[in-house]
Image (tube, rainbow, N blue to C red):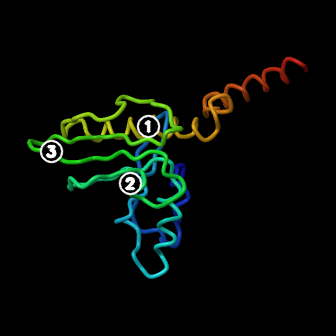
Amino acid sequence: DDVFTGGLDRTSRKDGEFALLWGSSLAQCVFFVGTLMPNDAGEQINKKRFIGNTYVKIVYSDSDAPFTLDSLSGQFNLIVVLVRPLPNRYFRVSVLRAPTVPVLGPIEDTAVIPMKSLSLMVRRIVIDSDIAAMIAVAGERNYSSNWHDRLKQIRNMLKRHQAH
């Protein structure tokens, strides 16, 4: 019950039966996967509600066709992590950013990554990219991480305790 699901419905399964989750002692991520969500008539809107409203999207493409941020519809297309397979179990991973998003993370533009490191690197890129997107949306001066917010709360509790 302490798993963050990003708003996915856990009771009626209207958002699908399965979701991809990752967690550590410091962070949790839910990956909205369109192919794991129902394709029933009317459910496309629900699918877009999740996938279309995320700042960071992962796109896997085995095509060499050009891909840009505009290839996906939606108002929150700030970052796309594009994964394309290469020969010999390698992958080309590209980070496409809106002009307002700062560079943050292990790769600035494109890197070739072996399959054995792919999930770790993409996850790291996605977590860092989400922070970069939040900075772009809030503005650098207004961005406050969860850690910073917790520190403020601890300091406020300490002040209240010292006042008594």
What is the crowding at mark 2: few (fewer than 14 residues within 10 Å), some, or many (at least 20)?
Answer: few
In the picture as drawn, the residue positioned furthest to the bottom comes out as 41
Instruction: Quote the CA–CA distance across marks 2 and 1.
Output: 14 Å
| Residue occupying the point 37% across, 30% down | 108
Verify CB contact (< 8 Å) between mark 2 and mark 1: no
Going by the numbered disc 1, the residue's amino acid type is: Ser
Q: Is residue 85 left or right of residue 26?
A: left
- 151 or 136, which lies in front? 136
Indicate which disc residue 20 carries. 2
Going by the numbered disc 2, the residue's amino acid type is: Leu
Indicate which disc residue 24 carries. 1
The nearer-to-camera label among 3 and 1 is: 3
What is the crowding at mark 1: few (fewer than 14 residues within 10 Å), some, or many (at least 20)?
Answer: few
Q: Position of residue 160 (x, y in %)?
A: 85, 24
Quarter of the image where the C terminus is located: top right
Q: How many marks?
A: 3
Q: Secondary structure at mark 3?
A: strand
Say which quarter of the image contains residue 150. top right
Indicate which disc residue 86 carries. 3
The nearer-to-camera label among 2 and 1 is: 2
Q: Secondary structure at mark 2?
A: strand
Please report whichever mark, 2 or 3, sits nearer to the chain's N-terminal start.
Answer: 2
Q: Position of residue 44 (x, y in %)?
A: 46, 73
Please report whichever mark, 3 or 1, sits nearer to the chain's N-terminal start.
Answer: 1
| Residue occupying the point 67% across, 25% down | 151
